[in-house]
Amino acid sequence: MNDVIQVRVHAALNITPVIREITFEPVDTALPAYSAGSHVQVHIPLAQRTLRNAYSLLNAPADRTAYRIAVRLQEHSRGGSRYLHENLKVGDVLNLSRPANLFPIHTLGRHHILIAGGIGITPFLAYSEHLLREGASFELHYAYRSGLTDAYVQPLAERLGDRLHAYDSLERPLNLAPILSNQPLGSHLYICGPQRLLASVREQASALGWPDGRIHWEAFSSAEPGLPFSVELAQSGRRIEVGADQSLLEALEANAVEIPNLCRGGVCGQCVTRYVKGDVTHRDHFLAANERADRLMPCVSRGCGSSLVLDL
Amino acid sequence: MANSTASPHAPFKSVPYYPPMAINPDARCHLVISDGSDLPRTQALVSRLAQTPRVDSLVLGASDTPSLQRLLQVLAQWFAGLHVGVQLHVLGSEAFLWTIHAQATAHGLSNEEISLCSPTDAMQRLVYCVHCANVHSHPLADAVKCPACAVALEVREHFSRRLGAYLGVCRNADAPYSGLPA
Ligand code: FES
């Protein structure tokens, strides 16, 4: 597929014990342009198979000479972040998918309020550069654990001055009510971080009368392991086995069944697939309850119990 | 083409639709703006909102807002001091609805925060003459005569939200001034 870009690792730096920043440079063709909030899928060559994880691009979108990502080591992941932390070396050549943006800045916003938890700061690094360049009005609230996920506090403080509000979770918890209560008409709210943070910001904002169209978020999630299961493809009659630490989407891809996908984390809705039979553990944040009766998101959801038959 | 029966003007067909009124129970401030043409409905809405934290209303023709210009000034002052969490309700003629809508969006409100009640003047509509750029109110009809430039206009099913008006274009280019009484 020519949707893949070859890149070389130009630099890799541990900026905290759990966060590693990786800079990619182009191998031969120039890097495609992207907008603030975009992510790329990094194709991670594990021993048995290639994993694809999505990471936000951090650098100023105007900078086309390199792509930068920051990877949080995930203890309970399937080895992708561990590989990027422990095995990846400067000079390695990797494949990336082209950037896609599921978390764009709202162009009509009068004022932008960015709220980040931990590694959720990554899209906002690109946001900040873009908004500074545009001379737009914004504020960034960054909650982190000191010494662990505070990777970008210092450079952001220098760059943003009093636009940055930093919350060391042990000393100064993030208090949402004052942030959400006094924002001028036309403000837009953006949240990125753990599910818990997303849920509480969204809930409080709605309770204060914020309409849905002003609230934007990006969840950081990727497929989590489960039990092995098998699926049947109704149209071809094929049967495919899905391993414990493999997602259904990955198993399909390994068998040359391509499904459109962007986030690989159950939020964008691209990979929606119909099923005709079977029990499903739904792990996405996209489908409504009634849609789950005959649809599933193979990037995160899995079969369980009786055997699963997909309408493919 | 998916639908061969679609009108050839389909891409331009954009008439406004006024959904049934929905109140956001979480809004911290409700603003009710009326042109005074249907006071019972305005009052009914204000009393329905009585349980919410804050309700303010403006009625065109009241002592502090005798003119549209004054009403727009007061509204602009309100907007400048308000925060996200507002719902605006507008009642009146279609032209009034869209004048207030334009002012509200200019202050950053989105369609989600503006609720336009169905117009009180269903038998009248504003027509924008593309030839002289004037807007006038006309009774419902497919063809009208522009009072400013006297061109006989065909009224298109194309609505400008910015102007609150339907598009009027010359109905017969060979005889632009004939065919309709003024
Ligand atoms: S790829 Fe985004 S929901 Fe599956």
Image (cartoon, rainbow, N blue to C red):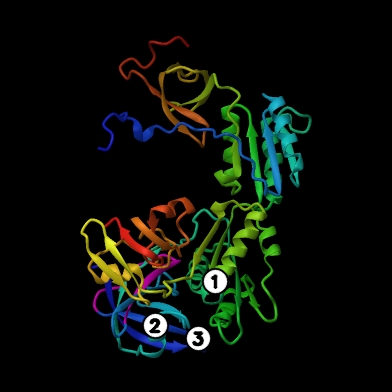
Check if residue A109 falls in the magenta segment. Answer: no
Q: Which mark is residue A194?
A: 1
Measured Cα–Cα span from mark 2 to mark 1: 19 Å
Could you classify mark 1 by the number of other residues whose Cα lies within 10 Å: few (under 14), some (14-19), or many (20 or more)? some
Q: Residue at x 40, y 74 (%)?
A: A227
Measured Cα–Cα span from mark 1 to mark 3: 15 Å
* Circles 2 and 1 on the same chain: yes
Measured Cα–Cα span from mark 2 to mark 3: 14 Å
Q: Which mark is residue A18?
A: 3
User: What quarter of the picture does the N terminus of chain A occupy?
Assistant: bottom left
Amino acid type, mark 1:
Pro
* Left or right of residue A115: residue A259: left
Q: Is mark 3 within 8 Å of ligand 1?
A: no
Could you classify mark 2 by the number of other residues whose Cα lies within 10 Å: few (under 14), some (14-19), or many (20 or more)? some
Q: Which mark is residue A79?
A: 2
Question: Disc 2 vs disc 1: Cβ atoms closer than 8 Å?
Answer: no
Which tag, 2 or 1, sits closer to the chain's start?
2
Q: Which residues are magenta?
A: A28-45
Return the residue found at the far front: A306
Q: Position of residue A168 (x, y in %)?
A: 65, 80
